[in-house]
Amino acid sequence: MKIISPDYILTPDTLLKSHAIAFDKTIQKIASLDTLKKEFPQAKIIKLQKNSLLMPGLINAHVHIEFSANKNQLSYGDFLTWLYSVIEGREELLSECNLTCMSNAIDAMLVNGITTFGAISSHGMDLKACENAKQNVIFFNELIGSQASMADALFSDFLSRLDASKAIRRKGFYPAVAIHSPYSVHPILIQKALQIVKNEKLKLTAHFMESEAERNWLDSSSGDFKDFFSTFLKQDKSISDAKEFLGYFNGYETLLTHAVKTNDEELDQIARQKHTIIHCPISNRLLGNPALNIKRLNEKNIRWIVATDGLSSNYKLDLFEEMKISLFMHSDAPLLQFAQELIKGVTIHAAEALGLNTGEIKEGKNADMLVLDLDAEPNKELTIHLILHRYNISKVFINGKLEKGNE
């Protein structure tokens, strides 16, 4: 048992003062330091500097670790231009990102306060790095393939990767499933994968409505994707539409990434099914896609969270940076309220979407916690300043274990 006594504790809706926390793997009790010392006399006391703030560890629900070698190999500014550059440079990028490369990306997330991440794994190359990670990991084995003639081979490969992830036995590692997108996965494959998801109660995610090209292709088999599918896959027609795709997930809450080109009918369906939308502002901007209409999500009571996407469409894996970009991108949102929602979008709301017992400083929750060194006493605009100033993260605890900093 350990006791930590920060000057301030950030809970979802309150800033606590003069409180300490007794914890092992979970948060056992929140009370005054004197009370905890009496109740846990053998506990080690962790000393902190002045103006220390304790807050929940951050949760990055969507990241592509396998493409972490990218620096300037891929083209930005337009979704199709970027996609063609990914196809052209895929083999080189994958070969350049060995275990050390992927581990470095994971370690960078830890330094940035990310205590849980969702790895979208296309090839299974990142399995060892994720197994070795200090963080909690939701390992999303991705299914992709739009050609019926390849369905059996593609599904066999997917099952092999899924089984390999299910063989990992360590606390905080969760095998899961990702369906790449409605334009890239054949309905036969989707339905077979979802049967496994539902039988085994696995977490599920998918890319959805990321670009205008996707919108046009799913609606009318037209637009920028027409040449792409004709050239690479000899397809002249979309394999499904958006409504059909969303229908496959009925009855199973899913994390849908991007969703910047969704229409009202689709949003109503997402709201009814209690899906979550993952907001990746930097990725959307770099690939020439519009900003997510968060006001519309709030009006429809759709939960949204924040993630970095991968280094194939970002320059760093830092949720504080991601929140800052979003704060400026959504210039019509009430500043303080939006900052508060952004913080929740990388903590409690992300934990709820992933079904994890974390994301909040509360008794009974997993002890995934950060200590930030503020430079002054915080005020009512603390969440704004957390996003703007990127305070030093001096300690990171994951499941109660100190993974960054000194006790």
Image (tube, rainbow, N blue to C red):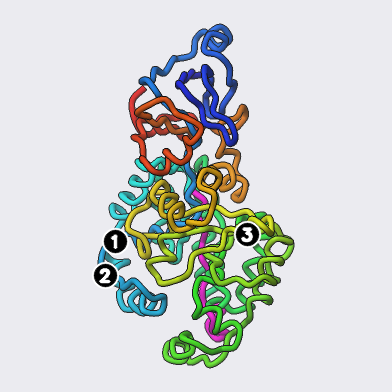
Give the residue drawn at x 59%, y 46%. 349
Whole-percent x, y for residue 204 in the image: 60, 59
Which residue is tagged 3? 297
Give the residue drawn at x 44%, y 30%. 401
Name the residue type under label 2. Gln
Mark 3 to mark 2 CA distance (whole Å)? 34 Å
Which residue is tagged 2? 73
Helix, strand or loop status at disc 3: helix
Whole-percent x, y for residue 333 in the image: 53, 53
Mark 2 to mark 1 CA distance (whole Å)? 9 Å
Write down the quadrant of residue 273 in the picture: bottom right
Magenta stretch: includes residue 194:
no
Q: Which mark is residue 69?
A: 1
Q: Is residue 404 above or below residue 307?
A: above
Name the residue type under label 1. Ala
Helix, strand or loop status at disc 2: loop
Whole-percent x, y for residue 398 in the image: 46, 35
Magenta stretch: includes residue 152:
yes
Q: Earlier in the sequence, mark 3 or mark 2?
A: 2
Q: Are marks 2 and 1 in contact (CB under 8 Å)?
A: yes
Name the residue type under label 3. Leu
Q: Quadrant of the C terminus?
A: top left
Crowding near pointer 3: few (<14 within 10 Å), some, many (20+)? Answer: some
Segment colored magenta: 137-153
